Amino acid sequence: MSPPRLPWALVGDDLAVPCVDGRERPYLSLDSAASTSALPAVARSVHEFLPWYSSVHRGAGYKSRRATEAYEAAREAALTFAGRDPDGPDTAIICRNTTEAINHLAYRLRLRRDEVVVTTVIEHHANLLPWARLCRRRFVECEPDGTFGVDAVAEALDDGERPRLLALSGASNVSGWLPPVESIIEAAHERGVPVLVDGAQMAAHVPLPTAADFVAWSGHKMYAPFGAGVLVGPRRAFADGDPFLAGGGAVDLVDLDEVAWTEPPEREEAGSPNVVGAVAMHSAIEELGRIGWAAIADHDRRLAPRLREGLADIEGVRLLGPESTAAVLPLATFTVEGLPHALVAARLSAEFAIGVRHGCFCAHPYLVRLLGLDHAQVAAYRSAVGSGDRRFMPGAVRASAGINTSEADIERLLDALRALVGGHPGPVPYRQDRHTGDYWPECDVPGWEARGRQVGAPCARG
């Protein structure tokens, strides 16, 4: 049977949203690297499961049994998705997302303050901050284009005492670059160093690395936005000691003075689990398997060059990251000369109904390097933020495609950017909020009135 033709529709693709000129336009989401909408099959699976929702591992009732079966089937599917034998030595811990998964592992490794974890400067904060509060970190630096090779990783691994772990991204959420993960894992294993791969950006695009000791990813980036993530690793890593979360379901016996923890993975999943999220992730895994990695890769290979080369061809647009599209996801981060990143994102949304991300993408050290900022500039920005002024925060704009993105969608973004760069004045003025740094159109168009604005965290926070 031939693979399904892409792009593949997602729930919400047919939405029309208001723009500041008073017209409605089809909404174009180019923010898949942050979160994806649900595949229709995922939404159907959740809808069909809801009548059977019940407590998991808690009850003898028929619905509870059905819910437990669904939850454990999702765990088995996650192991298979990560290239592991469900009957083998590894286990899958179902949690909220990649961030929680990495925090979970950081706690369970029982790191000492004087021990070392090697990581890289391209990481999402989820793979930087958990290690920082537990142990010392040694970093793999990147080249000006935001890449590094196996030799740079090997040098970091060899620079001092042997690290407890190498923790790296399988794909950058800023540049879309895919490091040579398999070769890096091999180099680490030659030195007796286990490896965690942050697979958040990989999971919807390429197979997860089977040789990694630990791998973490999120459902909300692979078309299952119902709040589940996974940490896969050797069962023995979770067999001793107290779990990351303590509570019901993680124990065999409790009295007022001591506790007997149960076996993993249940030991690691205290409280009522997110069975709906697990069902959704299971469905997404099956649907991605039905579509096939070959079809997804072919789709990405068509979109990535058009997106990146199209942006680079627009005068005044600076593309960040590697120039080659050989090992890059359909994701591009860029700046526009003379236009703040927050204003570009605001105008794309309010005037063109195009949703993108702007800011530092929860990867501040990496973006600082890609932008070429020096210490004095960073210090000035830090000082301004400390006084509550985020108007001049450094950042960029990111457009990221999913399996529902078409080549026509890419052209729509490029046309909109050409209009902005070409001096298109727009139908309304914009005002920047000092506290958040975001721009808001000044108008009374329904959907964009000042009274409808949500005041709170800036769009670029991370």
Image (cartoon, helix red, strand yellow):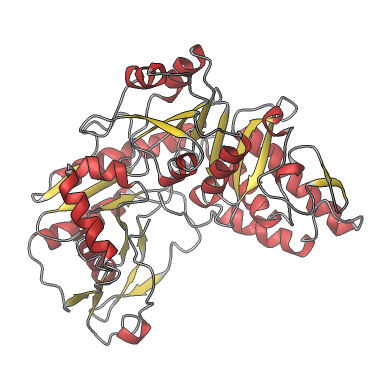
User: At which x and y percent is residue 366?
Assistant: 30, 41
**Image position of 93 (left or right of 302):** right
Whether residue 151 is situated above or below residue 407 in the rendered picture: above
Quick one: 323 or 38, which is closer to the camera?
A: 323
- Quadrant placement of the N terminus: top right
Relative placement, left or right, of 322 versus 3 is left
Residue 453, x across and y down, in percent = 35, 79
**Res. 337 image quadrant:** bottom left
Q: Residue furthest right?
A: 60
Residue farthest along the top direction in this orientation: 190
**Residue at the image position 41 percent from the left and 48 percent from the top:** 402
Is the residue 219 above or below the residue 116 in the image? Answer: below
Q: Nearer the viewer, residue 303 or 119?
A: 119
For the question of whether residue 172 can be seen, the reply is: yes
Report whether residue 287 is seen: no
Q: Position of residue 275 (x, y in %)?
A: 71, 54
Q: Give how far across and how far down residue 235 sits, in percent.
A: 71, 30
The answer to which of 336 and 349 lies nearer the viewer is 336
Residue at x-position 59% and y-position 52%: 96
Total count of labels: 0
Which quadrant holds the C terminus? bottom left
- Give the image quarter of residue 357: bottom left
Left or right? Give the position of 257 relative to 167: right
